[in-house]
Image (cartoon, helix red, strand yellow):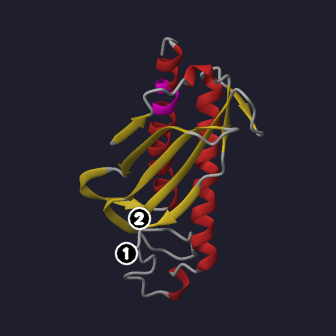
Amino acid sequence: MDAVFVRPDADIPAYTSVMLDPVQVSFARNWDPNQGRRNPAARLNANDVAAIQSGLADLFRETFRTQLAAGGFTLVDEPGPETLRVTAAIVDLFVTAPDTMSAGRSRTYTANSGQMTLVAELRDSETGDLLARAVDTQRGRTTGAMQFTNNVTNTADARRAIGVWATALRQGMDEMYGRAN
């Protein structure tokens, strides 16, 4: 993680369950999904952009739920006296070559698939007291060479980045709870 803050008096091991809020996804201010696209069929519209956001949010939730459940944490949907609330946002999302999966024979090559930043907060689910905050930026594969990029490779890079974040959360909680990783 690039930066982590844990409130000095936070008693995170007192929590026995975790509630995941829906993740918010926003693009980088300078991201233009249609930059360099001459073919109108390959241009992204508002529905395509919304699909990227909702798909990434769903992938985030699924990955975090799976990782936390594998770590033995009880997942709940409602606040409670021993429930830790995790609120996350993916900000500054920049997809280098978003793919609409349009018909035709074209290939896109990129040096990297993009980047995104996680801002996550852990709070008491009843009082809303901030217990911890983490910020981290993950970048897509960068090999130094141009590589074929499409929806599948973009999703794989996003899955890897989100997996890094979910694992870091679970390992951090394991440490706070005194569990072996």
Tell me if residue 170 comes above or below residue 102 in the rendering. Answer: above
Instruction: Point out the stretch of residues depicted in magenta.
Output: 168-172
Q: Out of 133 and 141, give the one closest to the viewer.
A: 133
Please tell me which of labels 2 and 1 falls first in the chain.
1
Q: Out of 158 and 169, give the one closest to the viewer.
A: 169
Q: Out of 135 and 37, give the one closest to the viewer.
A: 135
In this image, 116 relative to 170: left or right?
left
In this image, 108 relative to 100: left or right?
left
Return the x and y of residue 38 as percentages of the image width and height.
Answer: 42, 88
Badge 1: few (under 14), some or many (20 or more) residues near its Cα, within 10 Å? few
Residue 69 visible in the displayed image: yes
For the residue labelled by badge 2, is the local secondary structure a helix, a strand or a loop?
Answer: strand
Picture mark count: 2
CA distance for labels 2 and 1: 8 Å
Return the x and y of residue 51 as percentages of the image width and height.
Answer: 62, 66
Q: Residue at x 62, y 24 (%)?
A: 70
Q: Residue at x 49, y 11 (%)?
A: 180
Q: Quadrant of the N terminus?
A: top left
Q: Residue at x 75, y 33 (%)?
A: 80
Return the x and y of residue 32 as percentages of the image width and height.
Answer: 42, 78
What amino acid is at disc 2? Phe
Q: Residue at label 1?
A: 30
Mark drawn on residue 94 = 2
